[in-house]
Image (spheres, rainbow, N blue to C red):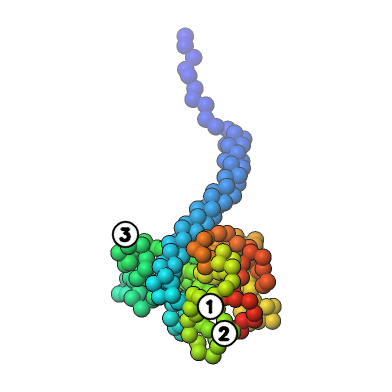
Amino acid sequence: MRTPHRHRGFSLLELLVSLVIVALLVALLLPVLSQAQRLAHRAACSSNLRQIGFAWQAYMTDTEQLPQHTTEPDWAYGGVRFVGTDHNAVADADRPINAYLDSDQSTQSSLAMGIFRDAADHGITERGRPLESVLPDGETCYQTFGTSYRANMFLLNSTTAGIDALRRPLKVAEITAQPSRLLLVGDPLWYYAIQDPDSSQYAFDARWHDRDSSSGNMAAFDGSVRWVRFGALPNNDFTIAPRAGSISR
């Protein structure tokens, strides 16, 4: 007589062991996936800045000067504005470098594809609170300013640069700093990293790509893009002064 085959299920102990193994694997994989995401965002940011840098170079070649001074020159050099109830991003014709984006595609489609948007952008934060943006409604820089990337205002205002009292854009010929070290535009972290501890701006931060260090991407005056450890000036990795001498904050 045949003994009926009995289907044996998992015992409670086996189930617990399986859950522990799965939990361990997840714990091992999450940091790897998180690091991969950070590297992907960092690479995309570098690509964005390279295209933005090309537009700056084209503008300067054409006009022989930096973009015209505006009320917010460090944000309004290029980027988008938002229209309609859906807040669709469209090219802002008043921003000077927009007209110099890659001619192989329309300005509007280039901007809509996110050249000015950093995927890691989570706005301006307070030091020690890296996930809570202090911008209106907790917005990102892109949502507030139309771009995630902050330009070097010392190149866009002759008074701030300590050259004269005319508040005019600088001529390319006036800039004598080493082009590969001179910051043109980059992650806004650079601005907060250079602040003195007694400055009101020192309370803020913008560490998007590496919360453990003041590092981010920058496009230099010569068009190169690289990863930089930002910090107090003088700094061997970068400078914001268009030429030797003091600058006015």
Q: How far apart are marks 1 and 2 (CA)?
A: 9 Å
Q: Which of 95 and 54 is in front in this view?
A: 54
Q: Nearer the viewer, residue 86 or 80?
A: 80
Q: In this view, does 240 lie above or below 158?
A: above
Residue type pointed to by label 2: Ile
Q: Which of 118 and 243 is in front in this view?
A: 243
Q: What element carries label 3?
A: loop
Q: What element carries label 1?
A: helix
Q: Horizontal and vertical percent for residue 239?
A: 61, 70
Q: Is mark 2 on a helix, strand or loop?
A: loop
**Earlier residue among tags 1 and 2:** 2
**Earlier residue among tags 2 and 3:** 3
Query: Which residue is depicted at the point 49% across and 75% down?
Result: 172
Please give the residue where the numbered disc 3 appears in the rendered image. 104
Q: Distance between the residues labelled 2 and 3?
A: 38 Å
Tag 2 and tag 3, C-beta contact below 8 Å? no
Residue type pointed to by label 3: Asp
Q: What numbered label is drawn on residue 174?
A: 1
Q: How far apart are marks 1 and 3 (CA)?
A: 32 Å
Please give the residue where the numbered disc 2 appears in the rendered image. 163
Q: What numbered label is drawn on residue 240?
A: none
